[in-house]
Image: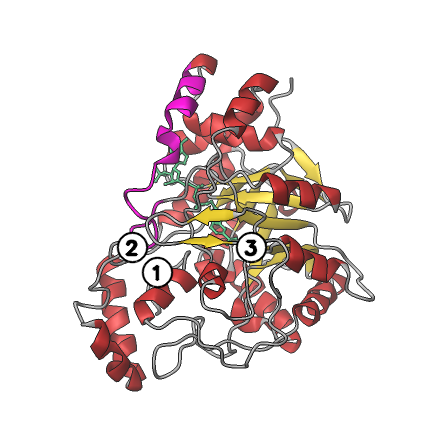
């Protein structure tokens, strides 16, 4: 077999490298479940402080300084990834790593290592930019950060609409998230226009359930289908039903947290099982003389999934690109299938809404999705509406700011 990195054909004719490099860097915050998220303030005092929004921001900024990660870590890692052979880089407006991605690509082009057309860059539309007239402006901000003329793939980060404005996580004076009312199909039409304008090669979605995908696919006058759906997917949450659904619609499933996530303290329960320590996975790795990470990535590739892997360590980055050198036999694939336990490392924001009787319900085609040590949510295929068009314009989704930041910011640090 060829050890050359493979590509997968998208439904619009473009190709996506089957292995991508993730650039999300969580800013560490208070530990999971901490009762003292903001400088030890009692939760009951927080709403009062929230009246003085500036003070809240100052407090959050103080926490951010305490937990800030080294600024250049992502940049160094992207350099290493490009040197190791990664040609697919995943970023997002909200990660604040787009500038690093652009800088690393420009430097490797200048060094003669790659040409722009060799690199597949994904970035994502943030939830405060879902109004159709704002979609292109968010993309243009990303292109400016990246200093690129186009991105290869632009995806809707979440099927969640939040109030437009400077705040990426807008809250009211009680610390409750401010949502917006936008028809997901109207946002999609604006995404289609970005493709027509040549600013993006392909358009897709992320964190969508099958019903939300269905809504776009059945939209009257649909010009372009989503090429992909990027979702949490790993050995403990193998998304087999959603994968089958996506395959039936010629939509590529892109797996994130495939190595079990970076386990940031603010949203991953430290007592949840560490994916790469799984005994069955480790035994199989020994048998194949590979690492557990390589087996975990290879498993997805053989299921026709595009997989993302993140690391800051040179040896791991080099190891992760070597997943095209071997193949797992069918019996081992079946053993790995059996490890699924519907365990979600990254609590999806819509999961919270599902518990709060709002018009949203996340359905990842799993019947019960276990969020370690928090709550489990029973989800049924047919029990919900799944867009925001009939939601109140300022729905309240979470009573405490700490809860909001945990659940609405699975990929982010403090609100600064
Ligand atoms: N669309 C979305 O909503 C969404 C959500 C989450 C993530 N994503 C994307 O998906 C990407 C990947 O997900 P992720 O960042 O959550 O994490 P991940 O790829 O599941 O895991 C990264 C962790 O695995 C470790 N690791 C990597 N290679 C390893 C190896 N060979 N051996 C042992 N450990 C290894 C890393 O450790 P070290 O610390 O040692 O390097 C790091 O802590 C993100 O960066 C982001 O681009 C998208």
Q: Residues within 10 Å of mark 1 (few under 14, many from 20)?
A: many
- Give residue 324's position: percent from left, percent from top: 58, 25
Q: Circle 1 sits on which residue?
A: 413
- Give residue 80's position: percent from left, percent from top: 44, 38
- The quadrant the N terminus occupies is top right
The reply to whether the magenta stretch includes residue 175 is no
Q: Residues within 10 Å of mark 3 (few under 14, many from 20)?
A: many
Mark 1–mark 2 Cα distance, whole angstroms, equals 6 Å
Mark 3–mark 2 Cα distance, whole angstroms, equals 23 Å
- Give residue 129's position: percent from left, percent from top: 56, 72
Q: Earlier in the sequence, mark 3 or mark 2?
A: 2
Region rendered in magenta: 263-286
Q: Are marks 1 and 2 in contact (CB under 8 Å)?
A: yes
Q: Circle 2 sits on which residue?
A: 28
Q: Nearer the viewer, residue 272 or 253?
A: 272
Q: Is residue 401 above or below residue 109?
A: below
**Ligand 1: image quarter:** top left
Q: Residues within 10 Å of mark 2 (few under 14, many from 20)?
A: many
Mark 3 Cβ inside 8 Å of ligand 1: yes
Mark 1–mark 3 Cα distance, whole angstroms, equals 19 Å
Q: Is residue 334 above or below residue 113?
A: above
Q: Are marks 3 and 2 in contact (CB under 8 Å)?
A: no
Q: Is residue 85 left or right of residue 131?
A: left
Q: Circle 3 sits on which residue?
A: 207
């Amino acid at each position: 077999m060829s050890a050359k990195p493979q590509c997968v054909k998208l439904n619009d004719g473009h190709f996506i490298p089957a292995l991508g490099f993730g650039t999300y860097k969580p800013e560490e915050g208070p530990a999971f479940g901490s009762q003292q998220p903001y400088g030890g303030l009692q939760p009951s005092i927080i709403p009062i402080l929230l009246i003085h929004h500036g003070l809240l921001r100052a407090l959050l900024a103080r926490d951010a300084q305490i937990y800030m990660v080294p600024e250049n870590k992502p940049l160094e890692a992207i350099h290493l990834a490009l040197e190791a052979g990664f040609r697919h880089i995943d970023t997002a407006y909200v990660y604040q790593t787009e500038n690093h991605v652009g800088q690393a690509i420009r430097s490797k082009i200048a060094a003669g290592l790659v040409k722009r057309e060799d690199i597949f860059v994904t970035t994502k539309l943030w939830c405060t930019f879902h109004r159709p007239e704002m979609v292109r402006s968010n993309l243009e901000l990303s292109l400016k950060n990246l200093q690129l003329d186009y991105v290869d793939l632009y995806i809707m980060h979440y099927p969640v609409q939040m109030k437009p404005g400077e705040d990426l996580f807008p809250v009211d004076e009680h610390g409750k998230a401010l949502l917006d009312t936008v028809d997901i199909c109207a946002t999609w039409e604006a995404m289609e226009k970005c493709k027509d304008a040549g600013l993006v090669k392909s358009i897709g979605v992320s964190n969508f359930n099958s019903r939300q995908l269905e809504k776009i696919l059945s939209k009257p006058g649909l010009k372009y289908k989503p090429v992909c759906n990027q979702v949490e997917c790993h050995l403990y949450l193998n998304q087999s039903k959603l994968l089958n659904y996506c395959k039936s619609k010629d939509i590529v499933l892109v797996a994130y947290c495939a190595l079990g996530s970076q386990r940031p303290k603010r949203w991953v329960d430290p007592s949840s099982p560490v994916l790469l320590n799984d005994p069955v996975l480790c035994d199989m790795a020994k048998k194949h003389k590979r690492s557990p990470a390589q087996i975990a990535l290879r498993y997805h590739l053989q299921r026709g999934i595009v997989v993302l892997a993140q690391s800051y360590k040179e040896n791991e980055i080099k190891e992760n690109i070597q997943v095209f050198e071997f193949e797992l036999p069918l019996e081992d694939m079946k053993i790995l299938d059996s490890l699924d336990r519907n365990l979600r490392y990254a609590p999806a924001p819509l999961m919270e809404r599902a518990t709060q009787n709002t018009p949203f319900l996340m359905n990842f085609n799993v019947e019960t999705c276990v969020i370690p040590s928090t709550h489990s949510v029973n989800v049924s295929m047919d029990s919900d509406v799944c867009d925001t068009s009939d939601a109140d314009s300022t729905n309240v989704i979470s009573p405490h700011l700490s809860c909001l930041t945990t659940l609405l910011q699975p990929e982010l640090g403090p609100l600064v």
